[in-house]
Amino acid sequence: MEIIAVAAMTEKGRVIGKDNRLPWNIPDELQHFRKITLDGMVIMGRKTWDSIKRPMPKRHNIVVSSSMNPVLGIQVCRSLEEAISEAKKIGKPIYVIGGRTIYQEALQKKMLDKMYLSFIKKEYEGDTLFPDWNPQEWELEKEEEHPEWTFKIFRRT
């Protein structure tokens, strides 16, 4: 079962958030995210959960948190490793959807097989950046241009 990071960030600064929210409103990019993750497993950190405040419909929601209590409609795991292990038991596509700490851990521990990245063309200010990643470890598999963003699929080499 492949483990895939899904993220949207600014093209130049790698901004993924500001004040625990997306700094942009691009409906077709959000729709693209929804289409990709539908019927899959979405793994997120507690801060990402706090920003959306409800389970994503038609997905199995897993929140990684060492202190959070269970909430109806989500599964709480104490570590990213536990979340991935639990997700694999269900046998649906596994998507790591943020935030920065979860992305960083998944990248550092080489847990990801692919990254589905949307690069927002306009620059936005933010306080949260997508972590650094080594482009030499990844091969560009697909690229789609959209008016406000570019979608790229990278596969680990």
Image (cartoon, rainbow, N blue to C red):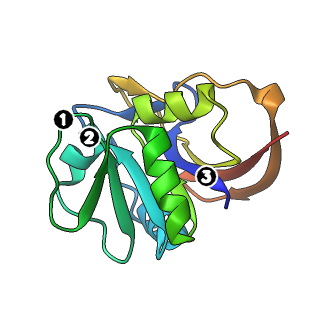
From the viewer's perspective, is residue 4 above or below residue 23? below
Q: Are marks 2 and 1 in contact (CB under 8 Å)?
A: yes
Q: Where is residue 17 in the image (x, y as percent from the top left)?
A: 34, 35
Q: Is residue 98 left or right of residue 20?
A: right
- Quadrant where the image shows the N terminus: bottom right
From the viewer's perspective, is residue 98 above or below residue 89? above
Q: Residue at x 51, y 52 (%)?
A: 85
Q: Which of 144 and 57 is in front in this view?
A: 57
Q: What residue type is labelled 3?
A: Ile
Cα separation between marks 3 and 1: 25 Å
Q: Residue at x 42, y 42 (%)?
A: 98
Can see residue 32?
A: no
Q: Where is residue 141 in the image (x, y as percent from the top left)?
A: 82, 53
The residue wearing badge 3 is: 4
Q: Which of 18 and 95 is in front in this view?
A: 95
Residue 147, located in which quarter of the rendered image?
bottom right
Q: Is residue 72 left or right of residue 40?
A: left
Q: Do the residues labelled 3 and 1 touch (CB within 8 Å)?
A: no
Can see residue 115?
A: yes
Q: Residue at x 43, y 49 (%)?
A: 83
Residue 46 is marked as 2
Q: Do the residues labelled 2 and 3 touch (CB within 8 Å)?
A: no
